[in-house]
Amino acid sequence: MNSADSFSADYRGARAKFLEDAQAAGGSLETITHPERGPDGGEVFTDVAAFGVEGAERVLVLISGTHGVEGFCGSGAQVDLLRRGETARRPEGVGILMIHAVNPYGFAWLRRVTHENIDLNRNWIDFSKPLPANPGYDLLHSAICPPVWDDAAQAASALATTRYADAHGALAMRAAMMGGQYTHADGLFYGGTAPSWSRTTQSAILTHYLANAAKIGIIDYHTGLGPWGFAEQIIVSARESDGFRRAARWYGAALASVADGQSASVRIEGDGLSAAPALLPGADVTSMAIEVGTHPTDHILAALQADCRLHAHGDPASPDAKPIKDAIRNAFYGDADDWKGMVAGQSLLAVRQALAGLSAD
């Protein structure tokens, strides 16, 4: 079996493989239609495949496409697991729930965000309370997402971020840019002012399928940070927490926590993994994000800035959009056999560890 064959060139191909292989593996399928359409005019969907979930007290949840264009990775990992027969080898009494393309609009349009321009991992906050402030982003927004993205604008953006880093430190600059903001609806890492369609959909899936579960593991697939093909295992809780210690029993000593600054990811507010325990108050929830590296951070941010400007001030259906879309696809998808093999192998190990942990705990 060649793991690279589990990955796809676009959203349509990824969805077709997932549905075909999930059905062949005996999964119970559900399809949820998104209110918007893809760039080809066709409908886009979040699909769910359940294996032994009904009535199960222990369930592993695998989520792809939280950040749209990052769905190439998670979808490929899910299909690889299906083709390897991992769902049939799960421990007795443990179910597997696969959520494919929870942000299908972003996957289809090659965007990291939802159709509302919302970063789904900044959207899981309590909107009845005052929105989090990010004064650093407010200072940088006009330079980060200008109406025009020509050479002069790119140079000005680089100068603004460099000056901010010089004044406040590199970590503060990354936090300002990537930590999430709630004041610029056309900007980067925007958290929104209300729950997005994808958040509402994921909430409904989890509460429906996991109503009877007492022990739940969640693996959410991401890309874009870290060395090429290396899958950092990220926990959102602090090292001294019960959740981190439980995850360490499952996955080992290589876990990174965003709480202590040791992860490639910055600490954020409003991520789905942190929100999961409140959705599932009757269960012990052990959540982990797999973050697979692609290219240097400045490469990633440049692709995001160009895409942000395109959708805020340009025409994503124009011929000028193609190089921008090619760049953002390349930023978040390592379309090479070695990268795909690394994703599949590290995913397989993590899933087997999680299943063993769920069975033993």
Image: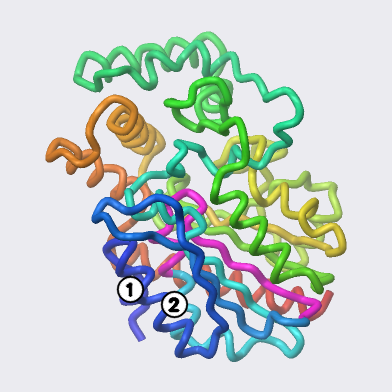
The quarter of the picture where the N terminus appears is: bottom left
Q: Is residue 9 left or right of residue 72?
A: left
**Spot occupied by residue 183 in the image (x, y as percentages of width and height):** 55, 20
Q: Does the magenta stretch include residue 342?
A: no
Q: Residue 80 carries which label?
A: 2
Q: Is residue 62 magenta?
A: yes
Residue at 52 percent across and 18 percent down: it is 137
Q: Is mark 2 on a helix, strand or loop?
A: helix
Q: In which quarter of the image is residue 132?
A: top right
Q: Which mark is residue 350?
A: none
Specify start and end residues of the magenta stretch as a single range: 56-76
Tag 2 and tag 1, C-beta contact below 8 Å:
no
Nearest the eye: 199 or 255: 199
Residue at 35 percent across and 53 percent down: it is 37
Q: Is mark 1 on a helix, strand or loop?
A: helix
Q: Which three-letter amino acid code belongs to the residue tagged 1?
A: Ala
**Spot occupied by residue 307 in the image (x, y as percentages of width and height):** 31, 35
Q: Which three-letter amino acid code belongs to the residue tagged 2?
A: Asp
Q: In which quarter of the image is residue 91?
A: bottom right
**Spot occupied by residue 96 in the image (x, y as percentages of width and height):** 64, 77
Q: In this view, does 44 lie above or below 6?
A: above
Q: Mark 1 points at which residue?
A: 4
Q: How far apart are marks 2 and 1 (CA)?
A: 9 Å
Q: Is residue 128 left or right of residue 105?
A: right
**Spot occupied by residue 237 in the image (x, y as percentages of width and height):** 75, 46
Nearest the eye: 296 or 93: 93
Residue at 46 percent across and 70 percent down: it is 77
